[in-house]
Image: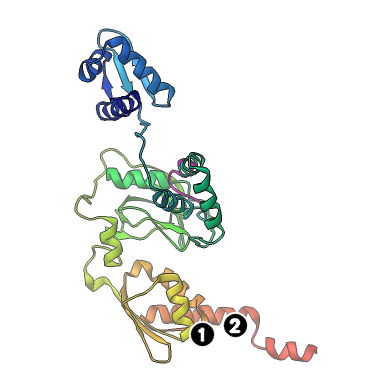
Amino acid sequence: MNKTQRLIQLMMAVNERMQFTTKEMADEFQVSERTMHRYLQELSELGMPLYTEFGPHGGYRLLKKRMLPPILFSEQEAVAMFFAFQSLQFYGALPFAAESTTALNKFYHYLPSDTKARIDALKDRVSFWTPTRTQSSPFLEQLLEAAIAEQPLRLTYSSKEGATERVVQPVGIYSSNGFWYFPSFCFRKEAILLFRADRILALENAETDHPRQSFQHYTLGDWLKAGQDMTPEASYLRLKVRLTPDGVRAYERSNGLDENLERKEDGSGLLITDIHPSNLHYFSKYYLSLGKEAVVEEPIEMVQWIREQIHAMQHAYGPNITTKARSDH
């Protein structure tokens, strides 16, 4: 076994053990303690965060930020990995944002020159575009860590009622149309509701004795697949929307293909699905934004809200704006 192979194996062993002595590693790799000490020094110089503890119970300890062993990629795999990283460039906020940038730069730097040239050519021909958002979402890492640890969070949240304080437990985080969302169990409403990360004004861990929900057998994928949450089906609202051909195209640009959307021969469509009442305001604003290309027929609460918004816009612009504009000419 050559020295490079031995260092890679040692790196893997260190990652697995986290804490060890020079003698333990020397015995395992069948080398002298002096040689093992030199190997560990070389790993440290390569960037592995090793910490030395002295005393009778001392030895080496690996700090939290571990260093992974080298991984060999084919050229096509390297290109695929680069563009997987680059697909995140349009997001204004990311969990581990600094690490993502560092990883992308490091990955590109060590590629062969001909592979770099291929990537440079492809960058002008491939893009994973999503709307660029300016809203800050500084709590993504905390939300993700809380979802993994099943940790309730006390947050101040900006909603249509104003700034409110509540305790929630995130199921996970996901991005859609440039925004970050985190479906969470709301202890006040006793249901899983959908929240937007950029609307968090303040966040901290809830008290250690606060009740917790177990999501061991319920993942973010389950939530996305079901469409909403774990509340009884009777609490859902029936959504029925008629879309013009332009409306169908606009809907599919935002939501992709939807099995609940029935396409007509002329290109128009009829969308029939269920939504949770907690998302009524969000979808009402969305279908209002489609203008005449979408006509909501159900639920009546959404129809009424859209009518009120249209009436308010007519009042704001004035009922005779067209007549006045013509008279000015």
Relative vertical location of residue 131 with respect to residue 83 in this rendering, above or below: below
Q: Residue at x 24, y 13 (%)?
A: 23
Relative vertical location of residue 215 with respect to residue 98 in this rendering, above or below: below
Distance from Cα at disc 2 to Cα at disc 1:
15 Å
Q: Please name the amino acid that badge 2 sits on.
A: Gln
Residue 41: image quadrant is: top left
**Which residue is at the far left?**
217
- Residue holding disc 2: 314
Q: Secondary structure at mark 2?
A: helix
Is 193 a magenta residue?
no
Image location of residue 87, percent across then percent down: 47, 55
Horizontally, residue 130 falls left or right of residue 171, namely right
Image location of residue 240, percent across then percent down: 35, 82
Q: Nearer the viewer, residue 143 or 73?
A: 73
Which of the two discs, 2 and 1, labels the residue nearer the N terminus? 1
**Which residue is at the far right?**
329
Callout 1 crowding tier (Cα within 10 Å): few <14, some 14–19, many ≥20: few
